[in-house]
Image: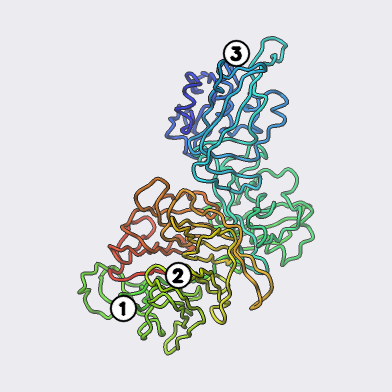
Amino acid sequence: MGADRGRARGKLLGSVVVLGSGSLLVSGCASMPSSGDVHSVSASQRADSQVQVYAVPPRPGAEPSEIVSGFLEAMTSDDPQFAMARQYLTPKAATDWRATEVTVLADGPDPQPTRSADRGADANGFTFTVSGKRVAVIDKHHAYLPTAPQEAYTQTIHLVRQSGGDGTGREWRIDALPEGLLLGQSDFQRIYRSVNKYYFAAGQDRLVADPVYVRQRTDPETQMNLIAQTVQSVLDGPTNWLKPVVASKFPSGTALKGDTKTLALDDRNALKVPLNDRASNADEAQCKRMAAQLLFTLRDLTTTRIGQVELDRSNGSQLCVLSGDQAETYAPDRMSTSPGQYFVDAAGHVERMRPDAGGSGAASDGSDSSDGSDASVMTEPVQGPFGKGEQQVRTVAVSRDEKRAAGVSPDGRSLLVAPLASGSALVRTLVTSDDKNAKDGGLSAPSWDGRGDLWVADRDAARPRLLRLVRGQGEPQTVDVAGLNGARVQQVRMSADGVRAALLVSDGSRTTLRIGRVERSGEGDKSVVSVVELRPGAPQMEDVTAVSWAGRSRLVVVGKETGGVSQQLRYVQTDGSTSAAGTLPSVNKVTDVAATDDDRMPLVAHSQEDGIVRLPPGANWRTAVKKGSAPAYPG
């Protein structure tokens, strides 16, 4: 039985016999690996993506409870066209039922007979109420749409008696039911996986990640394998949320040719994609951008290094070929392969951790660590006024090309920008805050987007604002943020592509993470920018302390889970779903966190107890600098 439904469903369904050695299931499904011996699988194993579930038809004379339980189990199978699940339905219901959308419930669906004197029986049949806590809905575009935390879900399933196929007997079958699939969270995680598909930012040759969920095995409805599903999802266009700010280079109506159901990499790690005639007239420049969308999507889909993507016309001739190296022109994040790790030292100056240092713990000037630091890296002041100059800052943001830095003054009231070059002069911007609360208010830590624009939030309670400086200079522009409903932006973190903003928003009682879409109208310095359609970034967390981008559609957040008491660090996707990486090792009293889009680089955080700490992949947290704060990667 499914892990999410074990307790509730056990009341309705009797013993289950697992398929093996000629025995058959009474009802429900059998879970079995795709290779090796057939064996029973316990509930704790159901989240294993290697487990494959096979549905079986209802047994003759099955009671209504068995029909409902068997149908709910059959929805978790990989049965082509859900043919076995449809056997639990009346002919009309089987024809009308569509499995294109998915409702995800935290603990799985709990079916109970409708509470009445006759326990669900009515004049025309039998009714069950299916309830649970809804987590999300996966729409027909494969987009993950989180719901309010612990949102109640209640729907009904109705059964009637109908004659058997031979005109004899009267079997219970479902004639009315909720639309789409109904899955518990562990079944959903077993069946589906998150994939980034890519589109071009409006007016730019820069790709933007658009996360969707596809089935890990062959899709029962389309019969496409994983790669074919993912490619077709790219061809279908962006999700509704991202659509206003991105564009696909594939002509409208482009699809896989004919009945293409399977796509696979060849022995050179290249993929050949046959397209229908809607794409046949694309020129070379357009075709290469089309291929770039697929190549970056496939990179996120598989750990294999993709050598090239070839697009073919409907007549079989080659449309274009794009290699992995050529695709880098369109990369979402154009940063150094070894971005610097910056922080503010105890004196208020900006330093960089030297990547070539070992574990000696020696200070950058060659002296001992007499302050008791257990630092494992060497550090050095940055060039320019933020380094050894007189200017002190409390937070810092380094541009993505690492040529400039922006810092907020210790009193939180001034934003300053300076080149990271020897002998350069400080540039004082026109951004100032009237907030007198130097500790918790004033200007937030700034953030650079991939276009070179600088963003900062003014947390002045009397006049809260989100501000943008085009290319980090000139007159600041106030950015309208739709949907705040009186809440204030406490922190802003911009994506590398510049079309998404991660905002920490406070309503006075708690701080939550919201992801906003950045829309632009007009050109150049005259463009008007707004942040719209805020959606929850970490719906499972009720109070978020810090956030950083940690991938093209992933963030790392620090905060407390709903109902929890201790601080946690967790990866989340920008669509609000929980990343497969899950919870990170804990570290005491984290106030800031920094990451990059490259998951080979360590996380960096500030702990009130341990100073600047780092978490390399596959390792534990380790103190890097005992006395320091405000860690930052470029961005």
Q: Which of the two discs, 3 and 1, sits closer to the camera?
A: 1
Query: What is the three-letter code of the residue carrying label 1?
Result: Ala
Q: Residues within 10 Å of mark 2 (few under 14, many from 20)?
A: many
Taking the image as shown, residue 227 lies to the left or right of residue 538, namely right
- In front: 339, or 303? 339
Picture residue at 52% right of the left edge, 51% below the top: 576
Give me the C-alpha separation between circle 2 and circle 3.
67 Å
Give me the C-alpha separation between circle 1 and circle 2.
19 Å
Tell me if I can see residue 325 in this picture: no
Give me the C-alpha separation between circle 3 and circle 1.
80 Å
Q: Earlier in the sequence, mark 1 or mark 2?
A: 1
Q: Residues within 10 Å of mark 1 (few under 14, many from 20)?
A: few
Residue 9 vertical position relative to residue 383 in the rendered view, above or below: above
Query: What is the three-letter code of the residue carrying label 2?
Result: Ser
At mark 3, the secondary structure is: loop
Q: Which residue is label 2 attached to?
A: 444
- In front: 633, or 392? 392
Q: Which of the two discs, 2 and 3, sits closer to the camera?
A: 2
Q: Position of residue 368 (x, y in %)?
A: 21, 76
Query: What is the three-letter code of the residue carrying label 3?
Result: Gly
Residue 512 vertical position relative to residue 456 in the rendered view, above or below: above
Q: Position of residue 248 (x, y in %)?
A: 69, 59
Taking the image as shown, residue 147 lies to the left or right of residue 604, namely right
Picture residue at 38% right of the left edge, 47% below the top: 564
- Quarter of the image for residue 288 reads bottom right
Name the disc covering residue 347, or none. Answer: 1
Q: Which residue is label 3 attached to?
A: 61
- In front: 37, or 476? 476
